[in-house]
Image: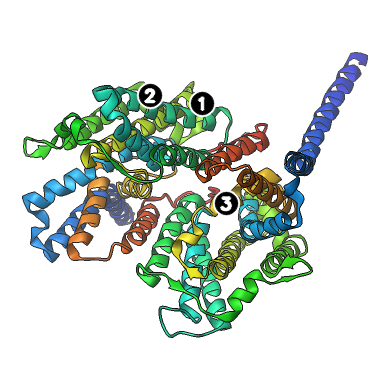
Amino acid sequence: MERDHEKRAAIADQFKEKIRRETRGERLRVYMPIILLLSLSVLFAVYDSRFFSPANITNLLYQMTIPLILATGITFVLLTGCIDLSLEGVMGLAGSSIALLILNTKNSNDFGAIGVLVPIAGCALIGAVTGLIHTKLRIASFIVTFAMGSITAGLAVLTYRGVPAVIKVGWANDLSVGSFWGVPYLTWIALGIFAAGCVLLYCTAFGCAVYAIGDNELAAKASGTHIDAVKTAVFAICACTSGIAGFISCVRLKIGQAAMGSDQLFPAITALVIGGVSLSGGKGGMLQTFVGVLIYTELQNFLTIIGVDAYYKKAVQGVIIIIAVAMTVSRSRKTISK
Amino acid sequence: MAAQTQTQTQTNMGSKMKLFVKDAVSRYTYILCAVSVVGAFYVLNPRFLSMYSVQNMLVEAAPLLLMAAGISFVLFTGCIDLSTGAVASCVCVLTGTYVARVGHGIIPLMILLGVAAGFANGCIVTKLKVPSFIVTLCAQSVWKCVALVQSGGGSKNIPIASRSLVLWASKPFLHFPAICWIALAVLMIFFFIQQKSVVGKNIFAVGANERAARMAGVDTAKAKIYAFVYSGLGSALAGMIYAYKLKSSVPNIGDPLNLMAISAVALGGTLMSGGKGSVFRTLVGVLTVTAISSGMNMAGVDAFWKDIVYGVVLIGAIAVNSEKGVRDLVVR
């Protein structure tokens, strides 16, 4: 009898120890990115005093604009456990069609705000189609979005057929160089979208559904969540933010070219995984995304300051993603990674 | 009573017949698809099947065939390899740059590089348990970086003095250039591996049901690593063939190939979720994709349309072939 009791106590102790270890791991995962951000900031500042000069801070704010917008959108997708590889194509499509619809050198269109909003809405629609293909035809998201990425990139080139349009509107210049309280307008837009993303994720039933699906899709389904609707909406949101990023890029570059989207997917995913958003879904959130974007931007900026070749930067990003994902992947769960 | 039984048997027969027809149709869709594509382009332009055009198409298909045959193994396991295009670019650049110095020794070296690239992918996927599309997406960026740094960003010709080293590949042999025969030979080897070797069987077992395969004593990690190694090998051979065919090193030659290769495998009817498919089906898929590509060229379609067409073909092919019977399957 007594031995039985002892045994039970031992098992209870083991269980407690396991829980404690898990929560410790969890806490480490939550605080790790913030510690990394602070230590990198200090390191960079010590290495080069120009890093926190006012001019470079403005630089940093500019550089974080597009990654922040894209990361906000893709956070929703990653939280459901899916992935969106079509960012680049959608962004290029939005940018090139916006450039063709507002005052430009290639045709006589001048639709103003409508010319900006319609392509962005179109992108959201494309995202919804992606979501529908993924959910209704039951094709894995990475392959649907991989194909959609190439379709939209092709469409982007097709809109201007070889020679991209250069935009001539006056407000584009004001928008791209102007600033308010020392923060560029474009960064304000990005922050606004990020705030909207936070509200949507943390304060609505939709946000809860996103977490529920990412954590355990079958359980969410059993408890009455409309999985297909939520997933479709998630892809629409992601494509919509890609469209907005395309607009921003178009305003900054003054030219609507499909290539503006290239190499934009990696920064977004890198930022998310460094920040601690799990690729298997359900873990992380907007704050992790924000920290991740900051880390990514600082790293990029620093690599530029010390003069690393642009070719190497992408390779470095690739290695960082693998390491970050390998560190955050939970091996205790018996999921099969494919 | 007897009449009732008879009608029952009849309905049974009817449904069985229907099932049989459905099964046969789904089994041979890929051939039907290939024939209809070729037929349509032949009707549009009878010169589509002229000797010259067919030769051209086979030369176009050779590198794609190698890459797609390799990638098939990865898809059999249910994983994906997005790095094949970049590996091909990298090998193309390295071959073009060093063939003058190393001579024919470059061939085993590059094969080794491809095997190493695949091995690295496979190890990270299996040992670190990172999803394969992330690993290979990152590997893509690494190999692209090597290709761009090595070439300085532009394409370069192989110097005239050492052209004799690479000319043999384009020389016709029994009507077709040597590279076509090489591609076919490698395909045969891959087919043999798939049908006869233990590794081939294990790869399919892993794709069909990984947990069950592991319980049955299959070394799932080893099977996956082998699959990635074959994929890397195929991509390296594809890149080398490009260098020999174009007689130059082109750092972005592989960029469009990845989508084409995966589309070709999907068109052949290989399941993206793994466990079903064949290298032979991939051959038919590659021929279909090549026919679409050169048929569009001959019909005078804008090159801008190509990416769009391949994307649509990929989604369509997967949608037709995917298993819709399983309702509770979580697709991500």
Determine crowd level at label 2: few under 14, some 14-19, many 20+ residues with C-alpha closer than 10 A: many
Q: Do discs 3 and 1 share a chain?
A: no
Q: Which of the two labelled residues, at mark 1 and mark 2, occupies the earlier sequence position?
A: 2
Where residue A163 sits: x, y (%)?
A: 37, 69
Determine crowd level at label 1: few under 14, some 14-19, many 20+ residues with C-alpha closer than 10 A: some
* Residue drawn at (12%, 57%) of the image: B48
* Disc 2 chain ID: B
* Disc 1 chain ID: B
Label 3 and label 2: CA atoms lie apart by 31 Å
Badge number at residue B199: 2
Depth order, front residue of B330/A23: A23
- Amino acid type, label 2: Val
* Residue drawn at (62%, 45%) of the image: A279
Residue designated by label 3 = A82
Badge number at residue B214: 1
- Amino acid type, label 3: Cys
Q: Nearer the viewer, mark 1 or mark 2?
A: 2
* Residue drawn at (77%, 66%) of the image: A182
Q: Is residue B111 left or right of residue B61?
A: right
* Disc 3 chain ID: A
